Image: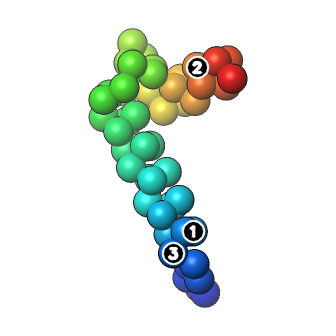
């Protein structure tokens, strides 16, 4: 693997990872009513409908 060459790339990856983990843990209202196994899929479906 070549790794991340730019600091900005590392920031984007870290922020995205943190967002996904927070969605999976139910810290946002996105997909909060779904089964925990399907929470991430439901959250991204809700986001797609909102955009």
Q: Residues within 10 Å of mark 1 (few under 14, many from 20)?
A: few
Q: Which mark is residue 27?
A: none
Q: How is the image coloured?
A: rainbow
Residue on which the image places disc 2: 46
Task: Locate residue 43 relative to residue 32 in the image: left or right.
Answer: right
Residue on which the image places disc 1: 9
Tags 1 and 3 touching, CB below 8 Å: yes
Does label 2 or label 1 sit earlier along the sequence? Answer: 1
Task: Residue at 69% x, 23% y: name it.
Answer: 51
User: Which image quarter is the N terminus in?
Assistant: bottom right
Of residues 43 and 14, the one drawn nearer to the viewer in this rendering: 14
Rendered position, 46 above or below 20: above
Q: Residue furthest front?
A: 8
Q: Residues within 10 Å of mark 2 (few under 14, many from 20)?
A: few
* Residue 25 visible here: yes
Residue 37's spot in the image, x, y percent? 41, 30
Residue 5's spot in the image, x, y percent? 59, 83
Residue 23's spot in the image, x, y percent? 40, 34
Q: CA distance from mark 2 to mark 1?
A: 26 Å
* Residue 38 visible here: no
Front label number (2 vs 1): 1
Q: Which mark is residue 7?
A: 3
Does label 2 or label 3 sit earlier along the sequence? Answer: 3
């Amino acid at each position: 693997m070549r790794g991340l060459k730019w600091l900005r790339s590392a920031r984007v990856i870290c922020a995205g990872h943190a967002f996904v983990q927070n969605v999976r843990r139910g810290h946002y209202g996105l997909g909060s009513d779904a089964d925990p196994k399907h929470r991430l899929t439901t959250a991204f479906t809700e986001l797609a409908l909102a955009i």
